[in-house]
């Protein structure tokens, strides 16, 4: 004879009723009792984890935009100028000839390009290049120097350096990664020295320096030579900032 086993149900002790199962606790929500006006406060919520990804596409797009802005900013060259003058009062600029140091004579092609960049600035200052160097009233030496150094960008909180991934409840907890790269920057300097041909005395000395993300091409050098001779024959204030538009942009 088959006997069916019925599930046994345990009854609560006398005097106690069966308690209904308690609902699961809610996580992340807290309710406040109604205030005196009968309004109920809004449940408070903890902020969830945040993720911020700066994709390579976004970095490339932003870099291209900054490049366009930088190109627009290169329409003028801002130079810091220092000048020292012993130019005689009442003496007008006249003819000149370029003079080269032995180290400059060893690199004639480079010096030719440098002197070509300075010719317009000398003409604007009132000088005329002499056809015969032996008959020039003044001798002019020009020089230039460019120094490159690399700027390292490795900052996960900004666009420089790549992307940042973060998860958690604050900026100091989580994990992240960044791309590090270098950007070249250039410090440029030009110098002009004007001497009296007959006595050899130095009449005027001036220097101009600038920096930026491009090297010393002929247009930038020409603008810097113009800045260096902007106040000729006065010495003006040292140092001073002189802005000169690039050729073809004024």
Image (spheres, rainbow, N blue to C red):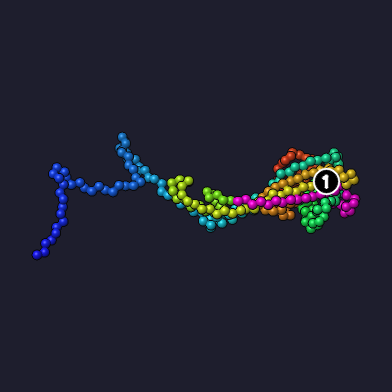
Q: Is residue 101 visible from the viewing direction of this image?
A: yes
Is 137 in the magenta? yes
Q: Please state the horizontal and vertical placement of residue 113, each as a whole percent of the image.
A: 77, 56
Q: Quadrant for the N terminus, please.
A: bottom left
Assess disc 1: are there few (<14), some (14-19) or many (≥20) residues with their C-alpha within 10 Å of its C-alpha: many
Q: Nearer the viewer, residue 5 or 245?
A: 5
Q: Nearer the viewer, residue 242 or 110?
A: 110
Extreme residue in the bottom direction: 1
Extreme residue in the left direction: 1
Extreme residue in the front direction: 1
Q: SS at mark 1?
A: strand
Q: Is residue 74 visible from the viewing direction of this image?
A: no
Q: Which of 180 and 39 is in front in this view?
A: 180
Q: Please state the horizontal and vertical placement of residue 147, each as a whole percent of the image.
A: 70, 51
Q: Which residue sits at x=31%, y=38%?
A: 33
Q: Please state the horizontal and vertical placement of residue 193, each as a whole percent of the image.
A: 81, 46
Q: Which residue sits at x=56%, y=52%?
A: 161
Q: Which residue sits at x=85%, y=48%?
A: 139
Q: What stretch is highlighted in magenta?
A: 129-152
Classify residue 175 as left or right of residue 39.
Answer: right
- Vertical relation: 87 (above or below) 8: above
Q: Mark 1 points at which residue?
A: 194
Main structural element of the magenta stretch: helix, strand or loop?
Answer: strand
User: Which quadrant would residue 205 be assigned to in this image?
Assistant: top right
Q: Which residue sits at x=42%, y=49%?
A: 49
């Amino acid at each position: 004879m088959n006997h069916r086993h019925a599930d046994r149900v345990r009854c609560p002790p006398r005097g106690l009723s069966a308690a209904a199962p308690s609902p699961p606790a809610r996580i992340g929500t807290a309710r406040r009792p109604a205030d005196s006006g009968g309004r109920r406060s809004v449940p408070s919520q903890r902020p969830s984890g945040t993720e911020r990804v700066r994709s390579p596409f976004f970095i490339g797009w932003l870099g291209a935009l900054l490049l366009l802005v930088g190109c627009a900013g290169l329409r003028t060259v801002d130079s810091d100028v220092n000048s020292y003058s012993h130019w005689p009062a009442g003496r007008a600029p006249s003819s000149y000839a370029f003079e080269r140091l032995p180290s400059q004579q060893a690199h004639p092609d480079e010096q030719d390009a440098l002197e070509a960049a300075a010719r317009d600035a000398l003409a604007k200052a009132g000088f005329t290049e002499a056809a015969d160097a032996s008959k020039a009233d003044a001798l002019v030496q020009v020089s230039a120097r460019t120094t490159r150094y690399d700027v390292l960008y490795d900052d996960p909180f900004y666009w420089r350096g790549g992307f940042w991934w973060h998860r958690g409840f604050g900026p100091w907890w989580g994990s992240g990664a960044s791309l590090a790269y270098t950007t070249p920057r250039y410090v440029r300097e030009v110098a002009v020295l004007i001497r009296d041909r007959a006595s050899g005395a130095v009449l005027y000395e001036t220097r101009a320096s600038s920096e930026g993300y491009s090297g010393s091409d002929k247009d930038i050098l020409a603008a810097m030579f113009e800045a260096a001779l902007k106040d000729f024959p006065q010495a003006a204030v040292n140092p001073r900032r002189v802005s000169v538009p690039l050729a073809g942009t004024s």
